[in-house]
Amino acid sequence: MSTHENLRKEFVNSTLDDTFNRVNSLVETAKHPRPLHLGILLALHIAKEIQAGKAPGTDSAKLVLAWTETHGAEVVDEAVVFARQFLLKPQILMEQIVNNLDSAKDAGQEESDVAAILEEDED
């Protein structure tokens, strides 16, 4: 089984906290995270809020505001769309994640270099 297949399996089998911590760490280390990745992290923030019995946006609204200042409104608007998609139709977003992993592999990136996938410029 390839590293990419292991990553897919690990992502699907992870707990919410594990996935949140992993994605948060990768996004924090990325110089220019894509809206897709910010959206995944936002969706995970919202899921954690719901899990804690809080209304969606209770804590994540502050994050969105900070991102707007850091990454710009256009990037954040796209991230919010991805977060909504992830929460409502996760199978579609999962396909995009898998495609990102596959395109990184096709481009000859090291299979273990997931951080580089988050830093790739959008086409």
Image (tube, rainbow, N blue to C red):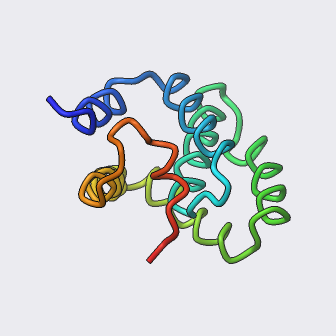
- Front residue of 72 and 103: 103
In percent of width and height, residue 76 lies at 68, 67
Vertically, is 57 above or below 120?
A: above
Q: Quadrant of the C terminus?
A: bottom left
Q: Quadrant of residue 4?
A: top left
In percent of width and height, residue 83 lies at 53, 56
- Front residue of 72 and 77: 72
Q: Quadrant of the N terminus?
A: top left
Instruction: Count up the numbered dots.
Output: 0
Residue shown at 66%/25% (left/top)?
52
Residue shown at 60%/63% (left/top)?
80
- Front residue of 29 and 74: 29
In percent of width and height, residue 23 lies at 55, 38
Does residue 38 appear to the left or right of 103 in the view shown?
right
Does residue 25 appear to the left or right of 97 in the view shown?
right
- Front residue of 69 and 106: 106
Residue shown at 38%/35% (left/top)?
112
Vertically, is 76 above or below 21?
A: below
In percent of width and height, residue 90 lies at 36, 50
Vertically, is 98 above or below 79?
A: above
Residue shown at 48%/72% (left/top)?
122
